[in-house]
Image (spheres, rainbow, N blue to C red):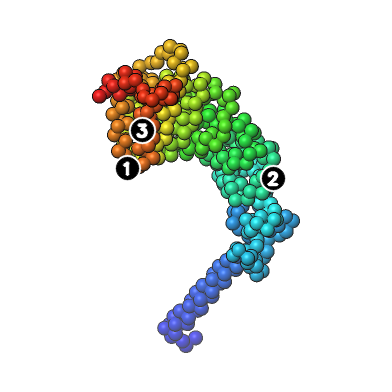
């Protein structure tokens, strides 16, 4: 015994310090092992997660290189030979798009399906040869995603179909989804979905069997046109300009009900891109209603119709057009002049040296 209490306390402090150091060192060592294990861990050969097209892509039947392996040799154009795009440039199929389509057939949650479809869209745009090698069954698989309950999946499916529609051999198969796309646009108020669906439709020639559905969704298309989302407005006005050239749909467009402030779309404060498309739409409508076969029928329009807003006795369209003639953007100026000419001279009278002033649209407003 014979040792003082202070001596025992100093000895106890030393032991605590040693234990603390040992504990801290052990924790650091365990953390190091966990990090090292994470770094060395390789993804499985067949992963269900979406695959990034820009990653180093192993060829069919090959495994990814381990982390310790040297980086892929750079190609003559400056990128590693392992990239999917580089493989295609060298005439080799990366298999990237096929893996994604096969992966889409498996069961996934909404987020995973959305990301897979997004990657498919990128592959179609970037890997032209692989996209052209796809089949109509692949188109049907992507199209089936339009029935998914999640809007983000629908949007990505629309984007993928839009990408595939750039390949001629798939257009007829994609056209079969036109009625479904119009239904989605008219029943779901989602601006991103509207833009994606309308971009797809604007990239396709719409067959005659779609016309009845177009007639049914016309009020919804007009609502989108009068919304405050520029991208959707530009896309829907392009579709309506196309539809306005169909003789059997012209009256349905002109008699469609619009808001009292519809002519606000012709204000100088609107973006130039929207103004230009709206003016093209107005020119198509003017030409259509002035065609001899259309004027041969006595049409009746409701008071709140598009026809009354643009061409009715109380319309202020002439004033808006005159203000657009001095618009800063030349395309808008030219298109505004085209609309003025179409309003003053019906197409079958333009071959004459001049139009009768009594037929002028602007006479009552001078």
- Note whether residue 116 is visible: no
Picture residue at 52% right of the left edge, 35% below the top: 202
Is the residue marked by circle 2 packed among few (<14), some (14-19), or many (20+) residues within 10 Å? few
Residue where numbered disc 2 is placed: 133
Q: CA distance from mark 1 to mark 3?
A: 14 Å
Picture residue at 43% right of the left edge, 11% below the top: 298
Q: Quadrant of the C terminus?
A: top left
Which quadrant holds residue 109? Answer: top right
Residue where numbered disc 3 is placed: 337
Q: Nearer the viewer, residue 349 or 304?
A: 349
Please give left or right for residue 207 compared with residue 66 in the image.
Answer: left
SS of the residue at dot 2?
A: loop
Q: How far from the left and from the top, in percent, is residue 276?
A: 40, 36
Mark 3 vs 2, N-terminal side: 2
Q: Nearer the viewer, residue 45 or 191?
A: 191
SS of the residue at dot 3?
A: helix
Q: CA distance from mark 2 to mark 1?
A: 47 Å
**The residue positioned farthest toward the bottom in the image shown:** 2
Marks 1, 3: nearer the viewer: 3
Marks 2, 1: nearer the viewer: 1
Q: Is 225 rendered above or below residue 30?
A: above
Q: Nearer the viewer, residue 112 or 10?
A: 112
Residue where numbered disc 1 is placed: 328
């Amino acid at each position: 015994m014979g040792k003082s209490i202070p001596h025992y306390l100093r000895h106890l402090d030393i032991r605590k310090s040693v234990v603390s150091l040992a504990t801290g060192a052990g924790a650091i060592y365990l953390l190091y092992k966990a990090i090292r294990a994470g770094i060395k861990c390789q993804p499985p050969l067949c992963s269900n997660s979406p695959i990034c097209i820009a990653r180093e892509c192993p060829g069919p039947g090959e495994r990814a290189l381990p982390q310790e392996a040297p980086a892929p040799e750079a190609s003559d154009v400056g990128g590693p030979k392992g990239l999917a795009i580089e493989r295609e440039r060298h005439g080799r199929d990366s298999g990237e798009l096929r893996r994604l389509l096969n992966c889409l057939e498996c069961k996934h949650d909404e987020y995973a399906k959305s990301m897979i479809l997004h990657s498919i869209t990128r592959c179609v745009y970037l890997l032209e040869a692989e996209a052209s090698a796809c089949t109509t069954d692949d188109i049907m698989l992507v199209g089936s995603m339009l029935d998914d309950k999640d809007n983000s999946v629908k949007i990505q499916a629309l984007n993928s179909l839009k990408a595939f529609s750039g390949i001629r051999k798939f257009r007829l198969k994609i056209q079969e989804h036109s009625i479904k796309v119009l239904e989605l646009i008219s029943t779901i108020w989602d601006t991103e979905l509207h833009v994606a669906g309308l971009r797809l439709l604007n990239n396709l020639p719409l067959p005659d069997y779609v016309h009845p559905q177009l007639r049914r969704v016309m009020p919804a298309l007009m609502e989108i046109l009068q919304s405050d989302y520029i991208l959707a407005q530009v896309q829907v006005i392009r579709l309506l300009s196309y539809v306005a050239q169909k003789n059997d749909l012209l009256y349905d467009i002109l008699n469609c009900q619009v808001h009292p402030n519809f002519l606000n779309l012709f204000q100088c404060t609107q973006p130039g891109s929207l103004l230009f498309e709206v003016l093209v739409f107005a020119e198509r409508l003017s030409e259509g209603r002035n065609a001899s076969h259309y004027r041969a029928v006595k049409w009746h329009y409701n008071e709140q119709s598009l026809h009354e807003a643009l061409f009715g006795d109380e319309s202020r369209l002439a004033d808006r057009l005159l203000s657009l003639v001095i618009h800063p953007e030349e395309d808008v100026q030219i298109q505004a002049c085209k609309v003025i000419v179409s309003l003053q001279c019906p197409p079958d009278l333009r071959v004459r040296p001049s139009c009768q002033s009594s037929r002028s649209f602007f006479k009552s407003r001078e």
